[in-house]
Image (cartoon, rainbow, N blue to C red):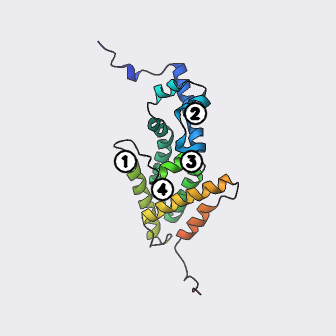
Amino acid sequence: MGDDHSAARPLRADARRNRERVLQVAQEALASDGLTISFDEIARRAGVGVGTVYRHFPTKEALVEAVLLGRIEGFVADARALSTAEDAGRAFFGWFARVVEQAAPNQALCDMLDAGSGMSLPPGSTLAGDLAAALARLLARAQRVGAVRADLAAQDVHDLLRGCLAAERRALARGGAVRMAEIVCEGMRARTSAPPAAF
């Protein structure tokens, strides 16, 4: 009989260490270099052969998923947890600012959050829809209490998030002050008085 349970066996200690090392290096490499990083370069930085990387992660997509999808799942879980917060405005703006703060230093995470990056999710994944739905719920609650402009759609907020991440990355690269999230959040707030007349 064949060994039908081999896939369920735990990794040997050395194989487990190699996998963890590859994941650690891949996370650092993806953060600094984005999705263009190669398997060969990740293997070199991890001090292992490229075959070791392929043994644990048969495709680049599989490696990227292992590193990044958990981060995005965390954003979704955070948004869902905040969807019943007493202060809906604070929940919305706090979530937006935290996503920017955590994602901006990570080029690959920014790439994955950017709908135009061409980076696909695993077949059957509902993560993109889950993120959109969680964001839409936070936005709707904040708009109902008058904390966020009523003319903003969830897609507008997604676009603002993408633009904010790009601007924050540029600021980080030149060593400037990182405050784009603060500026964007201020622009999304509902106006409490009429704007000044245009000249």
Viewer-proximal residue among 86 and 192: 192
Q: Amino acid at mark 4?
A: Leu
In the rendering, which numbered label is found on residue 197?
A: none
Residue named by callout 4? 82
Task: Say which residue label 2 marks.
Answer: 41
Neighbor class of circle 1 (other Cα within 10 Å; few <14, some 14-19, many 20+) is few
Number of other residues with Cα within 10 Å of mark 2, as a class: few under 14, some 14 to 19, many 20 or more: some
Q: Are marks 2 and 4 in contact (CB under 8 Å)?
A: no
- Asked which quadrant contains residue 163, the reply is bottom right
Q: Earlier in the sequence, mark 1 or mark 4?
A: 4
Mark 4 residue element = helix
Residue 36 visible in the shown view? yes
Q: Secondary structure at mark 1?
A: loop
Q: Earlier in the sequence, mark 3 or mark 4?
A: 4
Spatial CA distance of label 1 from label 3 is 22 Å
Give whichever of discs 2 and 4 has the lower sequence position: 2
Residue occupying the point 61% across, 31% down: 45
Disc 3 and disc 2: Cα gap in Å? 16 Å
Q: CA distance from mark 1 to mark 4?
A: 20 Å
- What residue is pinned by disc 1? 126
> Where does residue 1 sit, x and y in percent of width and height?
29, 12
